[in-house]
Image (cartoon, rainbow, N blue to C red):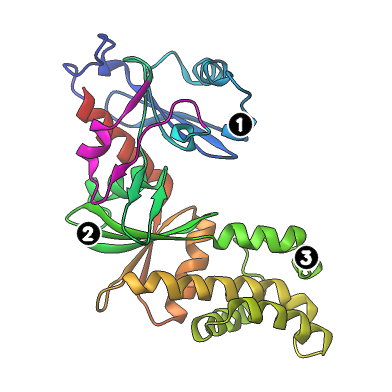
Amino acid sequence: MFGRERQWENGVPWADGFIAVDWGTTNRRGYLLAPDGSLVDETEDDRGILSVPAGGFPAAVEQLRRRLGDKPMMMAGMVGSNRGWVEAAYAPCPAGLDALAAGLAWPEEGRVAIVPGVAQQADDADVMRGEETQLLGAAAAGDVPADCLVCHPGTHNKWVRMQGGRIASFRTVMTGELFSLLRERSILADLLADAAVDDAGEGEAFDRGVAEGLRSDALLSDLFSVRARVLLGRLPRAEAGAYINGLLIGHDLRVGLRLAEGGDQVIVMGRPSLTALFARALRAAGRDARELDGERAFLHGARAIAERVA
């Protein structure tokens, strides 16, 4: 993947490989890549940016180096936010790999680069951090068409219109966060105590929830109705969590599919447990859906950006 003539600005050769880091709010994943781009080693922990004390990022980075090696690093995600290590300014839509490489922030000059997020400046203002590396990595690798619609499930689900291999426009839906808030603090908490956002539970109940979410435009009312149905014996308590999950995802699809064009196949990219859930809901909505592993896409993106700064 990398020729031996490639090197960092301070002379550290690409031939020695580098570490790609996906550093989010609550989790951190590090990948040691060989000179040819193959994966040598990896680590994952719960040291997201919120767990790092003020001034603590250099020590957290050294911890990664002790685990994976003393290598240059390419980082993406919330580590580049205003709550992270060094803020990497957003690249405006439409954004491609060249724009990300040009906007890299360097907390350690020549040693550590942070990928910028992407911003949509229109009336429907929106931002992303971390997903851009996966999206553009998948496009660079040929894993997604240059023009397509991508659904990226997560705490803040992204629906992204790709055009010409660049991020053209997108919408964020807070489905995962809303599910967590409902489970932790709402009147529905007892019905969701054992449910997980990436667990459909009883398949039929999930499917019914998706169908209702696709049909209805009254989510807040629909959510309270779930409690009423359980109290009145119209919905088994054991099925309530799966039904609520489907209801939220159905409403999510209503938002995201507005970016669809014609008979678009929807690429569902991310963690397999989540992509399976959204792909199932999309097929219930009559859409062709194809799943793609987000980790693979992230590594392609990190390598493609690294090549552009060598």
Quadrant of the drawing holding the C terminus: top left
- Tell me, yes or no, whether the two marked residues, 2 and 1, touch with CB atoms within 8 Å: no
Observer-nearest of 210 and 292: 210
Q: Are marks 3 and 1 in contact (CB under 8 Å)?
A: no
Image coords of residue 283 (percent x, y) = 43, 77
Q: Is residue 74 above or below residue 219?
A: above
Q: Earlier in the sequence, mark 2 or mark 1?
A: 1
Q: Is residue 84 left or right of residue 147?
A: right
**Span colored in magenta:** 84-106
Compared across the picture, whether 167 is left or right of 158 comes to left
Name the disc covering residue 189, or none.
Answer: 3
In the rendered structure, the answer to whether residue 125 lies left or right of residue 60 reads left
Which residue is labeled 2 in the image? 145
Q: Position of residue 116 (x, y in %)?
A: 35, 36
Q: For the point 52% across and 67% down, which residue is it?
A: 277
Amino acid type of the residue that numbered disc 1 sits on in the rendered structure:
Arg
Q: Nearer the viewer, mark 2 or mark 1?
A: 1
Residue 37 is one of the magenta-drawn residues: no
Residue marked by disc 1 = 47
User: Under tag 1, what secondary structure?
Assistant: loop
Based on the picture, tell me whether residue 99 belongs to the magenta stretch: yes
**In the image, what residue type sits under mark 2?**
Pro
- Residue 99 position, x and y percent, is 23, 38
Q: Is residue 58 above or below residue 277?
A: above
Question: Which residue is found at the position 49% from the left and 74% from the top?
Answer: 281
For label 2, the crowd category at 10 Å Cα-Cα, with few meaning under 14, some 14 to 19 and many 20 or more, is: some
